Image: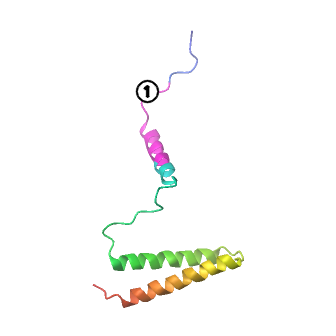
Amino acid sequence: MVKVTPDPPRFLSEDALLNRRAIDHYLKACAPDAPNFILNDNLSFEDALAHAADLLHCAVETAHASGEAMNAQQQAVMHLVEMAKGVVERALECVQPR
């Protein structure tokens, strides 16, 4: 019997390996028990506060940029985020720079 199509290569190209690695990484990251992100063990207190402040600032800006009217529950969550942002910013003001 004569085959019309050739056999697939026995090895994967570098691009195929990179694609497989990326897919495996993101699929495993979507697993229910996988953490959303991992903190660096060497993260200092001050850096952690600064990073939290940046994340809260981004959350507020993202919510305001959506342009859609928020329902009462979303407004309550945004109020909590803005309060947390204020507390973190105040904590940053209290921290002595090294």
Question: Quick check: 65 left or right of 83?
Answer: right
In front of the other: 42 or 18: 42
Looking at the image, which residue sits at the far top? 1
Quadrant for the N terminus, please.
top right
User: Whole-percent x and y of residue 88?
Assistant: 45, 83
What span is in magenta?
Answer: 8-24
- Is 14 inside the magenta-drawn segment? yes
Question: Quick check: 56 left or right of 98?
Answer: right
User: Whole-percent x and y of residue 75?
Assistant: 65, 80
Q: Secondary structure at mark 1?
A: loop
- Up the image or down, 22 lies above or below 13; here it is below
Question: Quick check: 27 left or right of 44?
Answer: right
User: Whole-percent x and y of residue 53?
Assistant: 46, 79
- Up the image or down, 89 lies above or below 18; here it is below
At 52% from the left and 79% from the top, the residue drawn is 57
In front of the other: 94 or 66: 94
- Residue bearing mark 1: 10
At 46% from the left and 50% from the top, the residue drawn is 25
- Tell me which secondary structure the magenta stretch mostly adopts: helix
Task: Quadrant for residue 48, please give it.
Answer: bottom left
- Up the image or down, 32 lies above or below 13; here it is below
Question: What crowding class fits label 1: few (fewer than 14 Cα within 10 Å), some (14-19), or many (20 or more)?
Answer: few
User: Whole-percent x and y of residue 22?
Assistant: 47, 48
Task: Quadrant for residue 95, please give it.
Answer: bottom left
Question: Quick check: 3 left or right of 41?
Answer: right
| Residue type at numbered disc 1 | Arg
At 44% from the left and 89% from the top, the residue drawn is 90
- Is 35 inside the magenta-drawn segment? no
